[in-house]
Amino acid sequence: MRVSNPAAVHARTAREVERAVAEVLRGGWWVGGPALQRAEEALAAAVGTPHAVGTGSGTAALQRTLEALGIGPGDEVVVPAVSFVATGTAVLRTGARPVVVDVLPGLPLIDPTAVQAALSPAVKAVVPVALFGNAAPAIALPDGIHRVCDAAQAMGRTAPLPPAMAYTYSFYPTKVLPASGDAGLVATHDPTLAQRVRSLGLHGRAPDGSFHKVGPTVAGNDRMDAIQAAILQARLPDLAPRVAHRRRLLARYRHHLPQVVLPHDPGSNVAVVAAVHPHRDRLRAGLSERGIHTGCYYPLPLSDEPVLADARVPAPTPRAHDFCTTCFALPCHIGLTEAHVDHICGVLLELLP
């Protein structure tokens, strides 16, 4: 049993997806154009913002949003210690410095108290992460500090995320709404920010056709291609049923293993079913021997990642360290049944000390 199953997701909408791809190929408008515009409008409606801009990846979505807000060399951006490394490297790529803070006890979401303690005159933004599809807590910030939500795992939530300047999404193939390749999205209520993000992906192109420097860095070529846009729009109607299925699987896991499987908030899309246990590696090995594959997405907190060695870590991150040494991901996808979950939980219960 696999942790995720993109092929099973595709099978549910294969006819619609393949028809949409063929239409784009036959139409010859492979960069930008009507397929991208339709997908951006549909995705904006899905997340509840009036503006959305397609990008080449979720990492690019976050980087371009920060750049569009004017963040660059000499600035600092606060990020949580538990997230995919791209949350930190997107900051580095703007020329700014990540500031890594600890997470809450019990659920690895950014700790607002740690954020407050980390603020400095150089901090220009905070990036809470909707880890596993859960909403990060609201954070009271002084005027002039932007809040940008890394919602890479949150597409398909049925409750809004806390207010932010922008929300950045990833459609990597293992996400709940997957592309068949890389793609991302910036969603915002601010039309000026949306236009700046779009310009950053088009070499700084302005509506009049001239090219400009946007923010502190030189713009480049980075956008969602029309084929991925068409694929996402074709898969979008199937998102809600699959989220409902993932929630049923989570409820089953929690029924059997409430002390091991992490809870989700009611609006979560259940992007990942995460379990925590001090004997994580032994449990994973035992499950693998029984044909049950698991994931270990965050073996190190961002405060320990070598690529972020120059980040500022204003205080120790013990809760993040504890989580990263005990967490693993259990199978959760549309090809899995509640009976499969019962079997997985039965094996886990046998393996628990």
Image: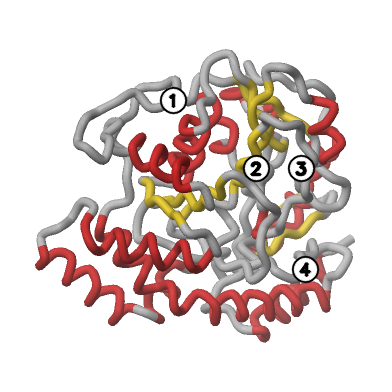
> SS class of the residue under badge 2?
loop
User: Circle 4 is placed at which residue position?
Assistant: 348
Q: Point out residue 20 in the picture as x, y percentages from the top left corner.
A: 24, 72
The residue under the point 37% across, 79% down is: 13
Is the residue 161 above or below the residue 249 in the image? above
Q: Are marks 3 and 2 in contact (CB under 8 Å)?
A: no
> SS class of the residue under badge 1?
loop
Q: Amino acid at mark 2?
A: Ser
Residue mark closest to the camera, 3 vs 2:
3
Q: Which mark is residue 215?
A: 1
Q: Amino acid at mark 4?
A: Leu
The residue under the point 38% across, 27% down is: 214
18 vs 120, nearest the viewer: 120
User: Circle 3 is placed at which residue position?
Assistant: 110
Image quadrant containing the C terminus: bottom right
Is the residue 199 above or below the residue 91 in the image? below
Label 1 crowd (10 A; few <14 / some 14-19 / many >=20): many
Q: Point out residue 154 in the picture as x, y percentages from the top left corner.
A: 59, 59
Q: Point out residue 191 in the picture as x, y percentages from the top left corner.
A: 45, 47
